[in-house]
Image (cartoon, helix red, strand yellow):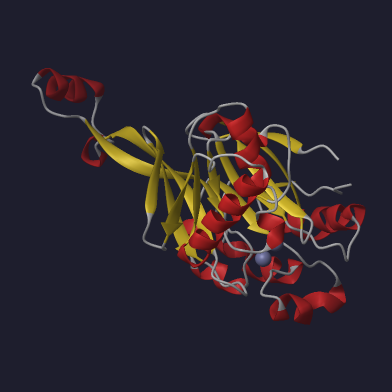
Amino acid sequence: MRCHRLEFPTSWGTLRLIGGSRAGEGTLLMLPQFRLAIEAGRAQRKLPAMSTLFISHGHADHLLAVAYWASQRALSRLGRGRILAPQAIASDLENLLECHAGMEGEAPYDVQVTALSPQSEFQLKPGIRLEFFEVSHRVPTLGCRILWSKKQLRPELSGADEAEIRRQKEAGIEITTRVEQAILSYSADTGVRVFENPEHLAAEILLLECSFWGENDRERARRYAHLHLEDILENIHLISARHLVLFHASRRNRLHEVRKLIDTRLRPATDAEIHDVMVEWE
Ligand SMILES: [Zn+2]
Ligand SMILES: [Zn+2]
């Protein structure tokens, strides 16, 4: 099954996202403009070109393709790769890569694993950084936000006329200031505590997991620390994102059923544009 290819207008510019997701079978989300993959749960041809991987937690459907990524990068001499992962799994990932490189009879892969805490941040490229936040899953899990640092007119000049702004500029007064805009936020696998994080919910693009959709699966969602459609509906008023992108549907529902529920239940409940990156992996 092919990945979805989506384009989002944001204040930074058009952001391209290539990805696919299904609970238990693999989640892979790539942002080629930043050479960043969020999760590596599935091998895909474009994955080795991503120089940074963010792995949110240790479940296999989020990291099964890490060895493929490292091995293909070594083969194509793509240079050093970097994995950003929660502290709890960072050394296990190093061991896993060492083990794979050994089986391939190769020198260790040129991969740097950075152990993250919720306070960590990472400069992805000039003006673009990653920030991390804790979510409530069955194992230690981090979500991430992509922040763009942009120049903006100083707030006290927002009502001023053009002549005054020009006068200040000519007098050598700084008329702009830097502000950060969250262009994307990724929930990872999470329970309902994610709705207590207003910064996450206000990013321009909100990638939100929704594993369970069936009427009888609410308890199951709680037990496995995942979101259910009803959790999102109950908290939809808290979401101010412009684009809501759903991922991680479980195999308990066919995708045509999921999309019907998106159309009949979610779309009428929000002004956000709703997309999904769910696929039937084969
Ligand atoms: Zn998962
Ligand atoms: Zn998980």
Q: Say left or right for 277 vs 120.
A: right
Q: Report the residue at 20% width, 29% height from top.
A: 175
Q: x, y (%) of residue 197? A: 48, 65
The answer to whether residue 106 is seen in the rendering is: yes
Q: Report the residue at 76% width, 60% height from top.
A: 23
Q: x, y (%) of residue 178? A: 28, 38
The answer to whether residue 49 is seen in the rendering is: no
Q: Say left or right for 230 vs 142.
A: right
Q: x, y (%) of residue 240? A: 55, 54
Name the image quarter holding residue 224.
bottom right
Q: Quadrant of the N terminus?
A: top right
Q: Report the residue at 73% width, 38% height from top.
A: 44
Q: Report the residue at 47% width, 32% height from top.
A: 12
Residue projecting furthest to the left: 171
Q: x, y (%) of residue 201? A: 53, 57
Q: Say left or right for 210 vs 171.
A: right
Quick one: 186 or 154, which is closer to the camera? 186
Residue projecting furthest to the front: 105
Ligand 2 placement by image quarter: bottom right
